[in-house]
Image (cartoon, rainbow, N blue to C red):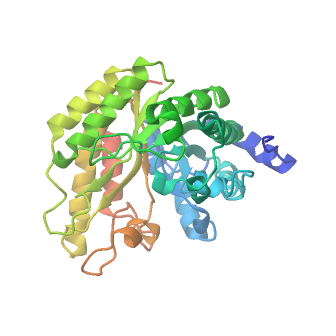
């Protein structure tokens, strides 16, 4: 199947994006006290996620333009959005977000070329006939998809989440998908990275997952570490680990705070990751606040303190150069729909509230940037 071609209009905004990408830390809209500016002074890029559902909210877009040096499309570059069927690609939603970002001189991260989980692959793959040579066809499908998406956005995107969430956190095993059942899970991951390197040779290639610093995440941490070690050993072209940083107590609605932490184990994990020569990114930060009190002032302060402690730890690693929230405002957080509070109150996991006013969490991020050591250029 021939790869989709760019229309002249798409070429124009991709050219504009390439120019914006040459300004790696600051958008054209940030003032001296914005999170983008405070991060840039230390060589840290700050950003958040934007979805097509946000493009009609001019006030929210203005907040992102003012605070962010980077945005990442929320769902619009994923397989489910870009690949309605085996024969076609649909980039209309991703293009709209990239066009907005480049028009505002904001950088773009790519998320994700392969969400390695059966639940999040397009429905048509579950019943797809891989034919008499299923391994060959699986490799062709994966290569075609990764190459098409990465090549399209390589002029704009300088960092791609190539593979997302390949490790089952409960078992520590690699997940399987319709593609990996024919190729092998690790071989699928390796092929995705090699294809991305060919299609976007200048981009940072990232493995992205949600292992973290809580005591109950040891199995997930260990499994991700083993995966990274195996990928490095086989020469997979991986540059960095994306740490999603959905902070807080995992799926818990009991009033037990934000979970027991194991900072020593987390530092050991990060030491070994960076010891492999991998860079670090915080890619999807927010705070799951269900276990916290309903009182807004208390809850906001607890969220802010947790965020500051986490970022102080993460930013103590010079290899960390990017901090992304998964939504700037409580107005649009995914957590309200997927993990609502049992008391019926709105969640407050983001640095700005539903009215787009700054919260203590915003100040915690700012203070962490001020306290951080400068990154190397």
- Give the residue displayed 53% in from the left and 53% down from the top: 121
Q: Is residue 208 above or below residue 120?
A: above
Left or right: 191 in relation to 360: right
Q: How many numbered tags mark residues here?
A: 0
Location of residue 64 in the rendering, given as x and y in whole percent from the top left corner: 53, 58
Left or right: 293 in relation to 315: left
Q: Is residue 91 above or below residue 154?
A: below
Residue 275 in sight in this render: yes
Q: Is residue 310 above or below residue 202?
A: below
Based on the displayed image, in which of its 4 quarters is residue 202 positioned?
top right
Based on the displayed image, in which of its 4 quarters is residue 258 positioned?
bottom left
Which residue in the rendered view is the most extreme toward the bottom?
344
Q: Is residue 290 above or below residue 160?
A: below
- Give the residue displayed 59% in from the left and 34% down from the top: 135
Q: Nearer the viewer, residue 28 or 274?
A: 274
User: Which corner quadrant holds the N terminus?
Assistant: top right
- Give the residue displayed 16% in from the left and 46% down from the top: 215
Based on the displayed image, in which of its 4 quarters is residue 41 positioned?
top left
Location of residue 205 in the rendering, given as x and y in whole percent from the top left corner: 52, 32
Residue 33 in sight in this render: no
Location of residue 151 in the rendering, given as x and y in whole percent from the top left corner: 69, 36
Which residue in the rendered view is the most extreme toward the front?
132
Location of residue 346 in the rendering, given as x and y in whole percent from the top left corner: 34, 76
Q: Nearer the viewer, residue 42 or 188?
A: 188
């Amino acid at each position: 199947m021939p790869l989709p071609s760019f229309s002249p209009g798409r070429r124009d905004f991709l050219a504009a994006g390439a120019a914006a990408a040459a300004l790696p830390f600051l958008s054209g809209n940030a003032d001296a006290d914005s999170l983008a500016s405070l991060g840039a002074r230390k060589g840290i890029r700050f950003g958040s996620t934007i979805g097509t559902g946000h493009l009609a909210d001019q006030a929210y877009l203005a907040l992102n333009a003012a605070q962010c040096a980077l945005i990442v499309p929320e769902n619009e570059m994923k397989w489910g959005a870009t690949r309605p069927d085996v024969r076609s690609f649909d980039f209309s939603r991703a293009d709209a977000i990239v066009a907005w970002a480049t028009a505002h001189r904001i950088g773009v991260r790519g998320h994700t070329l392969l969400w390695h989980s059966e639940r999040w692959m397009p429905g048509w793959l579950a019943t797809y006939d891989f034919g008499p040579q299923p391994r060959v066809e699986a490799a062709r499908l994966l290569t075609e998809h990764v190459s098409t998406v990465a090549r399209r956005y390589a002029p704009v995107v300088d960092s791609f989440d190539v593979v997302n969430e390949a490790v089952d956190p409960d078992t520590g095993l690699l997940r399987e998908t319709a593609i990996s059942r024919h190729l092998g899970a690790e071989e699928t991951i390796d092929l995705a990275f090699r294809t991305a390197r060919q299609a976007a040779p200048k981009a940072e290639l990232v493995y992205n997952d949600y292992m973290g610093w809580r005591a109950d995440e040891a199995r997930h941490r260990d499994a991700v570490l083993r995966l990274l070690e195996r990928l490095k050993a086989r020469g997979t072209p991986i540059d960095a680990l994306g740490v999603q940083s959905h902070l807080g107590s995992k799926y818990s609605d009991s009033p037990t705070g934000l979970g027991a932490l194991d900072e020593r184990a987390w530092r050991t994990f990060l030491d070994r990751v960076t010891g492999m020569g991998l860079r670090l990114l915080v890619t999807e930060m927010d705070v799951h606040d269900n276990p916290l009190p309903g009182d807004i002032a208390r809850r906001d302060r607890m969220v802010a303190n947790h965020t500051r402690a986490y970022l102080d730890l993460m930013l103590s690693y010079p290899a960390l150069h990017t901090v992304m929230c998964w939504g700037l405002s409580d107005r649009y957080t995914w957590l309200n729909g997927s993990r609502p509070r049992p008391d019926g109150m709105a969640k407050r996991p983001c640095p700005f509230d539903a009215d787009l006013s700054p919260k203590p969490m915003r100040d915690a991020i700012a203070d962490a940037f001020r306290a951080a050591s400068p990154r190397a250029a």
